[in-house]
Amino acid sequence: MLRSNHPIRMAVLAALLLAGVTMHAQTTASGTINAVLINKNAIALIFDTDPGGVPLGASGTAAVTANFGNVSAFGPLAAGVTRPSVTATTFTVRTRFDVQVIEGGLASANYRLTAALQGGTPTGFSFAIDGVTLTGAAQTIQNNGPFNVDVPHNLDLIISTASPTAGGPNVGTLTSQTINFTATAN
């Protein structure tokens, strides 16, 4: 009986020894990657929260949000929102935001910044940046912006005090507007 199991034991022992050798075997490989880097001239535009403005959603990116909160001609405003003007026909609320245009590989010393509203303006509202009223066409905001630094700008929301039947907004109207910015190296 021992003789008939002996070859099986030897096969099992040989298999265990081979497995042990295989598990401890070390292999190495090497390779080379040839890469070509092509440096292209470019600019990137990002928005940063200004210390005097509302915190921007997604600050430090190219697509941010600014929430003015509840606004009125005379009531309290959210932190970072001011009311620079109240007249018989409109009131203005303002926040500050920073634009940074980062450049690489350009010979240009500065850039031109434009802004335009995307879509129509809600009834009774208008928007301005640094006093420039925005429309659907690109408006020049700055002609000689310096690269690689935060440049502060004012975003104004001008609200009509007229009644809704006379062209003013409905009380409690929530407004949302997209402003498209373009930076072009000079």
Image (spheres, grey):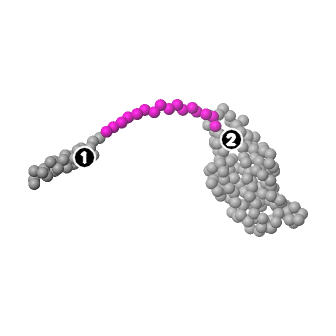
Across the whole image, how many numbered discs are drawn on residues? 2
Q: Kindly tell me whether residue 52 is visible in this rendering.
A: no
Q: Amino acid at mark 1?
A: Ala
Quarter of the picture holding the N terminus: bottom left
Classify residue 144 as left or right of residue 106. right
Q: Kindly tell me whether residue 118 is visible in this rendering.
A: yes
Image location of residue 163, percent across then percent down: 87, 66
The front one of 7 and 146 is 7
| Residue 54 quadrant | bottom right
Q: Secondary structure at mark 2?
A: strand
Local packing at callout 1 (Cα closer than 10 Å; few below 14, some 14-19, many 20+) is: few
From this view, report whether residue 157 is shown above or below residue 62. Answer: below
Q: Residue at x 62, y 54 (%)?
A: 58
Residue 143 colored in magenta in the image: no
Instruction: State which region is magenta.
Output: 27-42
Q: Secondary structure at mark 1?
A: helix
Quarter of the picture holding the C terminus: top right
Residue bearing mark 1: 19
**Main SS of residues in magenta:** loop
Dot label at residue 84: none
Separation (CA) of disc 1 from disc 2: 67 Å
Q: Residue at x 73, y 48 (%)?
A: 180
Q: Residue at x 71, y 39 (%)?
A: 184
